Image (cartoon, rainbow, N blue to C red):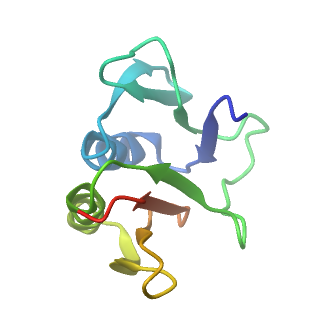
Amino acid sequence: MIGYVMVGTNHLDKAIIFYDDVLKELNLKRVETDPEYAAYAPMDKPNEIEFYVTKPFNKEKATNGNGTQVSFITTSRQMVDKFHETGLNAGGKSEGSGGERPSNSGVYYSYIRDLDGNKICAFTNNKT
């Protein structure tokens, strides 16, 4: 069982603006802010932090891992598409807009890269 996910950033202020917009589409909100990190939790469960964006503890440059991805499950294809659109509008890069992968699987995904190059996915198993 996963407790929470953390990604690194080299520009926390910019990352906060990005993730405030993008994660709102997944019903997550920022519940903690510190000079070193920001924490996000479900809007209806603010004490259950699921995601952090942080400056690296070792003070080295944040890098993204090749093959590393953070994926958020959603309840609808509309949420997946809105996540992708909001991510691009917030300065992210597309790694694949909404679609079933593999074709006819019934699982609907979209992918973005955040401002630091971290790969973030939203997906749903719902047909609508």
Q: Position of residue 65 (x, y in %)?
A: 72, 65
Q: Position of residue 23 (x, y in %)?
A: 33, 43
Q: Is residue 16 above or below residue 101?
A: above
On screen, residue 64 versus residue 86, left or right, reads right
Q: In this view, does 126 lie above or below 23?
A: below
On screen, residue 10 versus residue 17, left or right, reads right
| Front-most of residues 45 and 125 | 125
On screen, residue 126 versus residue 79, left or right, reads right
| Front-most of residues 30 and 45 | 45
- Residue at the extreme right: 58
- Where residue 86 sits, quadrant-wise, is bottom left
Q: Residue at x 51, y 23 (%)?
A: 49
Q: Residue at x 44, y 69 (%)?
A: 107
Q: Can you say which quadrant of the picture contains the N terminus?
A: top right
| Residue 115 visible within the image | no
- How many discs mark residues in the rendered view? 0
Q: Residue at x 27, y 63 (%)?
A: 77
Q: Which residue is drawn at 25% across and 46% down?
A: 25
Q: Where is residue 53 in the image (x, y as percent from the top left)?
A: 53, 39
Q: In this view, does 63 lie above or below 6?
A: below
| Front-most of residues 18 and 35 | 18
Q: Where is residue 29 in the image (x, y as percent from the top left)?
A: 32, 29
- Residue at the extreme top: 47
Q: In this view, does 54 lie above or below 72?
A: above
Q: Can you say which quadrant of the picture contains the C terminus?
A: bottom left
| Residue 126 visible within the image | yes
| Front-most of residues 76 and 12 | 76
